Image (cartoon, helix red, strand yellow):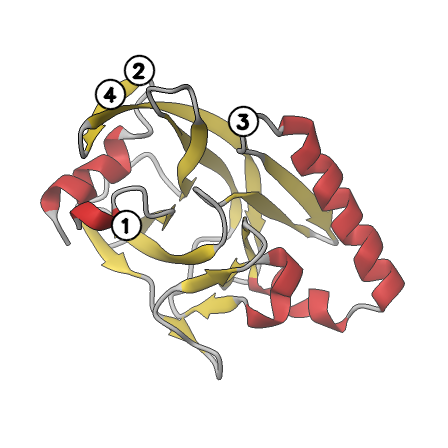
Amino acid sequence: MDQAIAELFEIAFDEEDIVVELADEELLFTNQPVGSLRITSEKMMAGDPGRASDALELRDSFPTGEFPVEAAIAEFQDGEEVIGYLRVKFSDNAPEHWDPAAYTGENARVSTLVESGIFALADAEVLKDLPTIDGDEREALMDRLNTSLDETYEDDRAWGALDYESNNLIACSSGDGPGTYSVYVGRDASGKICRLLADFALFEEDE
């Protein structure tokens, strides 16, 4: 991975707003807390909540507990705002190494498919259960998620949460919209997982 991109994975979430150059334009990144994610099974999935059957299960085992989730909002010079990155912060330790997420299962791919323009992270049990729920109940759950997203919607970016049994799901708008996006696992100096980050490809051309 390009070292500059790896460094951006952290500085985009700095407590102070930071300006980054993209092609001939400057982007202003702002850290936006979006909630807390509950992990109980040590397994996580990523994908489009509207197509949970296509969500991908990550191969790594993750810490259990409740962890802060943050979005790095990128503001373009014309005022447009999109979410550039979404991360789960498992500890305050700084990541020393980033790896592309590895997935398991029949539909394992290199990157996650987001058809609706909404990306989600959750304990694996949540996204495994959603496709099995009765149609009316599933529709009600998605309505609750959409209501949560609507509450924060502004300038084509939004985030929200959905409680489900003992776990929950955190979702956000995926960069410029539908696409395939990469997820990365950050490890600290001792090799322990300290970050999980979704990259919504603002710098794809530069990579």
Q: Which circle, 1 or 3, is nearer the viewer?
A: 3
Identify the residue shown where x is 85% and y is 69%: 134
* Whether residue 189 can be seen here: no
The answer to which of marks 1 and 4 sits earlier in the sequence is 4
What residue is shown with label 3? 155
What residue is shown with label 4? 19
Q: CA distance from mark 1 to mark 4?
A: 23 Å
Q: Residue furthest left?
A: 3
SS assignment at label 4: strand
What residue is shown with label 2? 16
Q: Residue furthest top?
A: 16
Q: Which circle, 4 or 3, is nearer the viewer?
A: 3
Task: Please name the amino acid that badge 4 sits on.
Answer: Val
Task: Please name the amino acid that badge 2 sits on.
Answer: Glu
Judging depth in this view, the residue of 61 and 100 nearest the camera is 100
Marker disc for residue 186: 1
**Quadrant of res 110:** bottom left
Identify the residue shown where x is 18% and y is 29%: 24
Marker disc for residue 175: none
Relative to 55, is 193 above or below? above
Q: CA distance from mark 4 to mark 2?
A: 10 Å
